[in-house]
Image: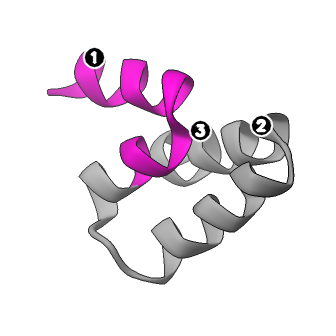
Amino acid sequence: MGIITLILTILIPPLGVALKHGFGGTALLNLVLTLLGYIPGLIHGLYVNYAN
């Protein structure tokens, strides 16, 4: 499931974050960042999913 999450995070960052963390505060924050600009949403999505 890791590669699917990565692909979804790159294509649609809020969906990739929601897939891994659920539809909570993290996904909502990512949705707001993505609406403000794709790059901030992408960076946040990759960070919360893979920066451990």
**Above/below status of 37 relative to 10:** below
For the N terminus, the image quarter is top left
Residue 12 is situated, as x and y percent measured from the top left of the image, at 50, 34
Q: Which residue is mark 1?
A: 3
**Residue drawn at x 61%, y 60% as measured from the top left:** 30
The amino acid type of the residue labelled 2 equals Tyr
Where, by quadrant of the figure, is residue 7 drawn?
A: top left
Give coordinates of residue 15: x percent, y percent: 39, 46
What residue is disc 2 on?
38
Q: Residue 3, relative to residue 27: is it above or below?
A: above
Magenta: main secondary structure: helix
Relative placement, left or right, of 51 versus 9 is right
| Residues rendered magenta in the picture | 1-17
Q: x, y (%) of residue 27? A: 47, 66
Q: Residues within 10 Å of mark 1 (few under 14, many from 20)?
A: few
Label 1 secondary element:
helix
Residue 9 is covered by the magenta coloring: yes
Q: Residue furthest left?
A: 1
Instruction: Report the Cα–Cα distance between label 2 and label 1.
Output: 20 Å
Q: Is residue 13 left or right of residue 7?
A: right
Mark identifier at residue 19: none
On residue 46, which mark appears? 3
Depth check: give the residue in front, 32 or 48: 32
